Amino acid sequence: MSTSAEVLASPGRRLPGDLAMWFFILAELTVFAILIVAFAVTQLLDPALFAESRQSLDSSIGLALTLSLLSSGLFAALAVEQVRQDRQGRAALLLGAALLTSCIYVVLKLNEYGHLAGLGLDLEHNRFFTLYWILTGFHFLHVLLGMVILGWMAERCRRRAYTPDHCGGLESGVLYWHMVDLVWVLLFPLVYVLN
């Protein structure tokens, strides 16, 4: 029976991406965890306010946002597999699809932000919306950065800059995008559904 150290040290087995990206992701997840805990604790302290405020959100929009990010993450993961099979052209197309599906998230989120602002449900309306804007706004900024990364990686794939043996940069970018997905999968039920 092999130990976990032997498995990690064995040829062909390695941590995907760059170690620096893993540290960055851990730091970002820590910040998001603090914000999520703050939201959850504040909800415990004032559940009626949170239940009432949540009625102003459309959970079907939240679900569409979730599906767009998860679809984008799937396309990005498939792109990594295509590069590992030395099919950079297909990887570029899949990263383009990931970028397009993430645009759905941006359009829907901007529409939601505009609708809520039009109703006067801004950052200062109450504690629910203060935390809503901080959490989802911080996540939105990560989505925008991730979209830039997706576009950059698609162009690099188009130029055949990655190879099956040298795709750590691609893996790191996709790991970042999966972190963005993971955070949203936690935010969606917390913000839109759970009372």
Image: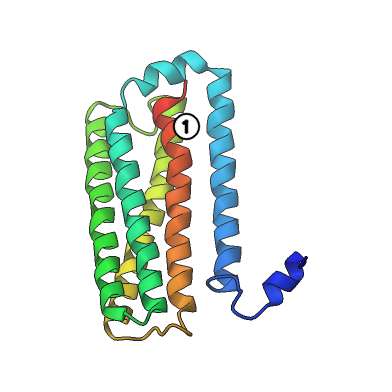
Q: Residue at x 55, y 60 (%)?
A: 25
Q: Which one is nearer the viewer's eye here, 124 or 66?
A: 66
Q: Residue at x 40, y 63 (%)?
A: 77
Q: Which one is nearer the viewer's eye here, 115 or 146?
A: 146
Q: Classify 58 as above or below 12.
A: above
Which residue reaches farthest front?
1
Q: Classify 76 as above or below 38.
A: below
Residue kind at label 1, given as amino acid type: Leu
Q: Quadrant of the N terminus?
A: bottom right
Q: Which residue is mark 1?
A: 190
Quadrant of residue 14 in the image?
Answer: bottom right
Label 1: element kind: helix
Image position of 99 (left or right of 84): left
Percent across and percent down for residue 104 are: 23, 49
Which residue reaches farthest top?
48
Image position of 46 (left or right of 113): right
Quadrant of residue 82 in the image?
Answer: bottom left
Q: Which one is nearer the viewer's eye here, 103 or 136?
A: 103
Q: Residues within 10 Å of mark 1 (few under 14, many from 20)?
A: some
Q: Residue at x 70, y 76 (%)?
A: 9
Percent across and percent down for residue 112 are: 26, 37
Would you say residue 130 is visible in this rendering?
no
Image position of 99 (left or right of 181): left
Would you say residue 78 is visible in this rendering?
yes
Percent across and percent down for residue 10 are: 68, 77
Q: Classify 94 as above or below 74.
A: below
Q: Residue at x 28, y 86 (%)?
A: 159
Image position of 66 (left or right of 180): left
Percent across and percent down for residue 128 are: 44, 27
